[in-house]
């Protein structure tokens, strides 16, 4: 019985390679308040977005927000992700917010919408380690 289970696991489809990524905003940050948007290219907050498996992490300012991916769908080379992220650390458990992400495989970019911030990030494979 154990051999049959092992063989079934070997035959099961594996996750597609290349789903993990790391992105950062090298050129600008866009902030919107409902009335208008502002593009900041000189002095903006560096952000890093990282996906490993079904987890997502967004680091900005001096903190990181993390969560499990709740929605993951790909269509025509564009992957749509959504996660309810929380600032890491026990003192920040109540600070949850929705992070929406669109990742273009051909352009190697991600667009995020999170807490009034809209940013285009440049992507590549996640850092080793």
Image: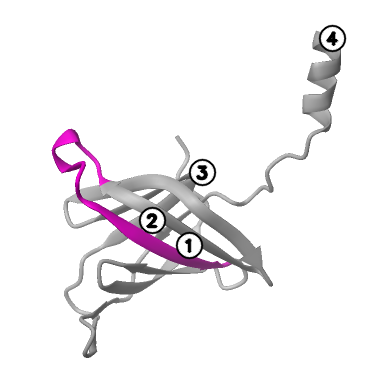
Residues at discs 2 and 1 in contact (Cβ within 8 Å):
yes
Whole-percent x and y of residue 83?
41, 54
115 is higher (above) or lower (below) than 126? below
Residue that carries the numbered disc 3 in the rendered image: 54
Dot in front, 3 or 2: 3
Q: What label sits on residue 49 in the rendered view?
A: 2
Q: How is the image coloured?
A: one colour
The secondary structure type at the circle numbered 4 is loop
- Based on the picture, tell me whether residue 86 belongs to the magenta stretch: no
12 is higher (above) or lower (below) than 118? above
Dot in front, 3 or 1: 3
Residue, x 72% and y 39% (percent of image)? 14
Which quadrant: the N terminus?
Answer: top right
Dot in front, 1 or 4: 4
Residue that carries the numbered disc 1 in the rendered image: 123
Left or right of 101 in this view: 77: right
Residue that carries the numbered disc 4 in the rendered image: 1
CA gap, disc 3 and disc 2: 13 Å
Residue, x 45% and y 65% (percent of image)? 101
């Amino acid at each position: 019985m154990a051999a049959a289970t092992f063989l079934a696991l070997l035959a099961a489809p594996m996750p597609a390679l290349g789903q993990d990524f790391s992105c950062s905003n090298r050129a600008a940050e866009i902030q919107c308040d409902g009335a208008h948007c502002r593009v900041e290219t000189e002095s903006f907050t560096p952000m890093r977005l990282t996906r490993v498996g079904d987890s997502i992490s967004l680091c900005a300012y001096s903190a990181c927000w993390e969560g499990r991916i709740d929605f993951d769908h790909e269509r025509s080379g564009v992957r749509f992700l959504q996660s309810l992220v929380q600032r890491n650390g026990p003192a920040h458990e109540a600070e949850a917010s929705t992070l929406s992400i669109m990742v273009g495989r051909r352009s190697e970019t991600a667009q995020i919408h999170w807490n009034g911030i809209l940013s285009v990030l440049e992507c590549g494979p996640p850092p080793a380690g």
